[in-house]
Image (cartoon, grey):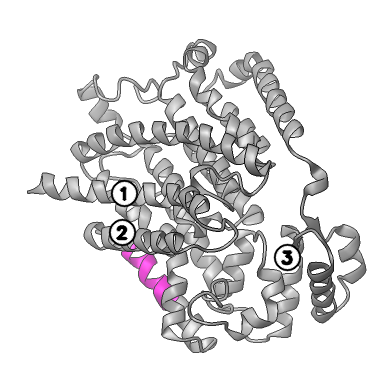
Amino acid sequence: MKFEVRFILQRLFFIGFWLATCTGFVSDLMFDPNAISPLTTISHLAVDAIILFLAMCTMRRKSDILFISTFIIISYISTCLLNQSSLISWLNGLRLFFGILFLVPILNYFWATEYRHDIFVKSLDRQLYIFLWLQVPIVLFQFFVHGAGDYVGGTMGNGFSGVLSFSIYFVSFYLIKKRIDRNNILQSLYKNWIYIFLLFPTFLNETKISFVLILLYFILLMPIDHKYLIRMTFFAPVIVILVGVGSFFYSSTVDDSQGKLKLDADFFEEYFDADLETIEKAADYAEKNESQSFDIPRVAKLGLMPMIFNENPGHHLLGFGIDIFISGNVVGENDFHREYDWILKGTNPYSFTIYLQLGTVGAIWAIALFVSFFFNRPKKFKQRDLNSQIFFFITIVILLLYSDLWINANFCYIMFTFLMLSWKRNPVAIAHNPSVNSSNPYTA
């Protein structure tokens, strides 16, 4: 009976994974890629339902229950009591947090026993490899049809170019790292060149963050020990060549003249001392009268956020509620969204998103949650893969200023699976069974 339960839950997990990561492209082919299609809506609801069901079936750890229950309390007080939104709006807003709330507890179920873990990872590796290969023809198709930009989101579809780039680097990093011999790095890379080749779609979608990710990718492939600097000295020319090739692809495919209109530093030097009404009018004018799309720079949004709180006293502690980014879709538009929709549009840093919704209390909760990910070790897998967790930690820091990708289930599926894969078998267990994980020299 236990096997059947494990089998059903694992199948559900992967169904959710493929729905989250592949529906977008199919929807773009069938409907207007610039609008929310019925297929996208149904898919998102299905993924949310799967995640919630799996969490209810698998959540056991007290720390997971603590974080989820405190979030429910904080978000309810902020949304329904302080900002007087409806219960439906609050429940709808909760969906944006399903990924960061539930996926780690779900994955802990599969890491609870070695048997579950081994079967899960064996299936996972095959499916992640298929995921990487699917991006190649689809990204090429999107690139030739739409050009470099947001449309090139691979299987995830329009608007997910950033999620795609992060996903490709982390999946490739995990798969190639399992096959690297720490004593023969260059030879291992040569034998497993296909995983490096599968990075190339990230240079066809105009995501500048790819240049940061490719550096981290190769720097962190090196095992961190007393020979690290020596290895990096010999490996540096390879990194330079690969980054140069990536830069060539990027510069050859991206037309800067077609980029989005930005409110640059000169704009904010002129208007930063003005009130928000002045800036809002300038933003509204740009959106209505310019041919290019309007998008306030990420860092500028962080600079404008204190002005919003100063205009609305009493919200610093608990923010404006978790429904402000989804108003107008299903449950109607709330007062905050109606007044400040101009600053909510476009790409938002995660620090901006979390603080605007839940204030200081929510920011403290989010910091505590992300810190806990590095210390809540699975009982059977307490050995830390330092390189992988450094990669994950740097990503957390980057996203504070780069984007609120954590609200997307497809991103959370990839990232939190990668995080759990960074926990390896206990050294004692490996010593008793040398054949365990022998394909991974990092854990041998």
Q: For the residue labelled by badge 3, is the local secondary structure a helix, a strand or a loop?
A: helix
Q: For the residue labelled by badge 2, is the local secondary structure a helix, a strand or a loop?
A: helix
Q: For the residue labelled by badge 1, is the local secondary structure a helix, a strand or a loop?
A: helix
Counting residues from the start of the chain, the first of labels 1 and 3 encountered is: 1
Counting residues from the start of the chain, the first of labels 2 and 1 encountered is: 1
**Decide: marks 2, 1 in contact (CB < 8 A)?**
yes
For the C terminus, which image quadrant? top left
Numbered badge on residue 340: none
Q: Residue at x 46, y 25 (%)?
A: 176
Numbered badge on residue 15: 1
Q: Is residue 206 left or right of residue 380?
A: right
**Decide: marks 2, 3 in contact (CB < 8 A)?**
no
The correct choice, above or below, for 313 with respect to 63 in the image is below
Residue highlighted by disc 3: 301
* Mark 3: amino acid: Lys
Counting residues from the start of the chain, the first of labels 2 and 3 encountered is: 2
Per the picture, the main secondary structure of the magenta-coloured stretch is: helix
The correct choice, above or below, for 60 with respect to 396 in the image is below
Q: Quadrant of residue 46?
A: bottom left
Q: How crowded is mark 1: few (under 14 residues within 10 Å), some or many (20 or more)?
A: some
Q: Which residue is drawn at 22% across and 59% down?
A: 57
Q: Is residue 71 magenta?
A: yes
* Mark 2: amino acid: Ile
Numbered badge on residue 50: 2
Q: What stretch is highlighted in magenta?
A: 64-74
The correct choice, above or below, for 100 with respect to 413 in the image is below
| Foreground residue among 285 and 241 | 285
* Mark 1: amino acid: Ile
Q: Distance between the residues labelled 2 and 3?
A: 34 Å
**Residue 290 appears in the picture as rendered:** yes
The correct choice, above or below, for 286 with respect to 310 in the image is above
| Foreground residue among 132 and 237 | 132
